[in-house]
Amino acid sequence: MLYLNTDLPALHQLCTEGLPIARGHHDAALNVWMLNLMPLKCATELDLCRMLAASGIEVNLTLVKFPGQTYKSTPQAYVEAHYLDLDSAMLRHTIDGLIITGAPLENIPFEAVRYWEDLCRLMTWSTTHTRSTLNICWAAQAALYFHHRVPKHPLAAKMFGVFPQTVYRPEHPLMRGLGTAFPMPHSRHTEVQREALPTEVEVLAGGGKSGLGILADAVRRQVFAIGHLEYEPLTLDGEYRRDLAKELPILPPENYYVDDCPDRGVDFSWRTAALQFYKNWLTTLRPAP
């Protein structure tokens, strides 16, 4: 069961899908916070709530934000109504897990991001006040830069599509049940390179055209997901058609459409892996018996 701290639109949508989700709090559930940095917050809420609700693990999810920020793509009133400020009182808590989402900021230097100092404080806090932080896409690159000074590099062309991720560490708890390889969506203009990683960062999965996939730093309690396992089926399709409408240079997402034809529909090939990965991550948050 997923318990939400607020009456999100995602609650009602996921109820209609038959997933166990409710507004409230359960004392025995894991406590997870989500810092949603995406402009279209409702879509990201729905994606991640779906993963957590389908896990079969009891989770209290609290949506959090940096104080004093203004929003354009999502109404300010919506964010103020549903998200709690990460103020000094909130940061006195110890929680089980933290999710930091991606953000469309790849072409901006990290230090030029308006909330970079707030994010740095949160990333420092996360190393001592959570069991694990799951950093997704841009947040994964930002966390690797903050914790290890690993730079990001621009790509000649957007990494766009669904790519096979070879499992390098099948014995790792995060890789349980994922087999020897699994598909993962990627949608990004930058990359981090394996040779820049310090020894304490393990590459759990990746390889091939998309490069790094999922990494972990046990010392700092960080997980870095370079792609987007949480994406619902039509997200990449929406990005592709949006860019076409803007007459931007974009090719169809690779390994995504049935028979590679945009008019034939989407092959939702990563669904099983996505559900397994999020279940694995939540399982790592449970206290050892």
Image: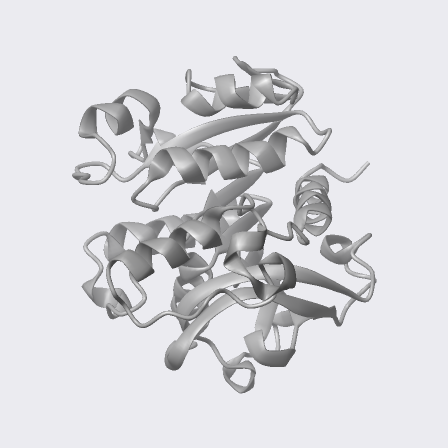
Image location of residue 205, percent across then percent down: 68, 68
Q: How is the image coloured?
A: one colour
Most foreground residue, 230 or 146: 230
Image location of residue 105, percent across then percent down: 29, 61
Give the quadrant of the N terminus: top right
Most foreground residue, 65 or 274: 274
State whether residue 56 is above or below residue 276: above
State whether residue 240 is above or below residue 277: below
Q: Residue at x 42, y 66 (%)?
A: 188
Image location of residue 191, percent across then percent down: 44, 75
Give the quadrant of the C terminus: top right
Q: Residue at x 27, y 29 (%)?
A: 79
Most foreground residue, 239 or 30: 239
State whether residue 213 is above or below residue 12: below
Image location of residue 233, percent across then percent down: 56, 46
Q: Residue at x 24, y 60 (%)?
A: 246
User: In this view, which residue lies farthest toward the bottom?
Assistant: 195
- Residue 287 in view (yes/no): yes
Q: Is residue 146 left or right of residue 140?
A: left
User: How many numbered discs?
Assistant: 0
Q: Residue at x 48, y 33 (%)?
A: 46
State whether residue 47 is above or below residue 84: below
Q: Is residue 108 left or right of residue 282?
A: left
Task: Name the image quarter holding residue 212.
Answer: bottom right
Q: Is residue 85 left or right of residue 127?
A: left
- Residue 94 in view (yes/no): no
